[in-house]
Image: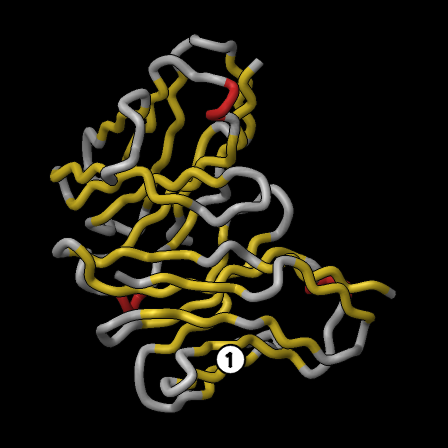
Amino acid sequence: AQSVTQLDSQVPVFEEAPVELRCNYSSSVSVYLFWYVQYPNQGLQLLLKYLSGSTLVESINGFEAEFNKSQTSFHLRKPSVHISDTAEYFCAVSGVSGGYNKLIFGAGTRLAVHP
Amino acid sequence: DAMVIQNPRYQVTQFGKPVTLSCSQTLNHNVMYWYQQKSSQAPKLLFHYYDKDFNNEADTPDNFQSRRPNTSFCFLDIRSPGLGDAAMYLCATSRDRGAGGYGYTFGSGTRLTVV
C-alpha cells in the first residue's frame, strides 16, 4: 500500500527567502506524485505533478519539485517566497489499490511567510 | 469554465439532524469522490462513485451515505451528525479510475459545523 510522509507540519519563513517542503512516499509499484495547495477555507488546487520523464517538474508560480526514486522523495522548493504563498501544502501519491486509482495525501505542511 | 461546485460553502446543522451536502461537475468525469478533512489533517477518502458503481472505504462510518443520480451530481448524506463530524467536506472528480496521472479536480469544499 502507498503512503506519504510530510516531514514538517509547519514551516515559517521570511518573505523572499528560499523554502523546501519535504515529502517522502512509500510504494511497491510505480506511482504518480502530486503537490496540492490549499488556501484558507478553500478546496485543494493542483500545484504540480510528476508522471514520468524529467524528474524536475515546475509550476507556473515558481515552485518546483524533484522526483528522487532512490530516496523515495518528492520535495517541493521555491527560491524566493511571497506573502501570498502562505497556505497549506499537501503531497499526494496516486497508485492503483483495490482495482482502482486512489489518491493518498500526506498530513500537510503549513507554510507561513512573514514580512 | 469546467469546474466542480460544492453547495453550500458553509453548513450549520444540529446534533442528530440529517444533513445533505451537494456537489456538481461540468467536467463530465466518470469518477466522483468525497473526502472528509478535519482541522490540520490530511483529507480522508470516504467513498467514491465510478459512474453508478458505489465504492465505500472500509473505515467509513455507516452514518455517511452518498447518492449519484446522474453524471453531474453527487450528494453526501450524514444521517445523524455528531460533534465529531464537524469538518471540511471536499468533493473531487477524476476522468477515470485508472487515470492516476491526471490527478483530481477539487471543489471549494463545504465546512460543516454541528451544534
As drawn, is B94 to the left or to the right of A88?
left
Q: In this orientation, which residue lies closer to the viewer: A77 or A69?
A: A69
From the image, tell me which residue sits under label 1.
A65
Counting from the top left corner in percent of width and height, residue B74 is at 29, 33
| Image location (x, y in percent) of residue B61 | 31, 27
Residue B26: horizontal and vertical position, in percent?
A: 32, 46
In the picture, the quarter occupied by the C terminus of chain B is top right
Element at badge 1? strand
Residue drawn at 51 percent across, 32 percent down: B87
Q: Amino acid at mark 1?
A: Ala
The image shows residue B92, relative to residue B65, as above or below, that is: below
Q: Residue at x 48, y 67 (%)?
A: A35
**Residue at image point 46% right, 87% down:** A56
Question: Is the residue B2 above or below the residue B11 in the image?
Answer: below
Q: Nearer the viewer, residue A100 or B106?
A: A100
Please tell me whether residue A82 is drawn above or below residue A99 in the rendered image: below
Q: Is residue A4 left or right of residue A42?
A: left
Q: Quadrant of residue A4?
A: bottom left
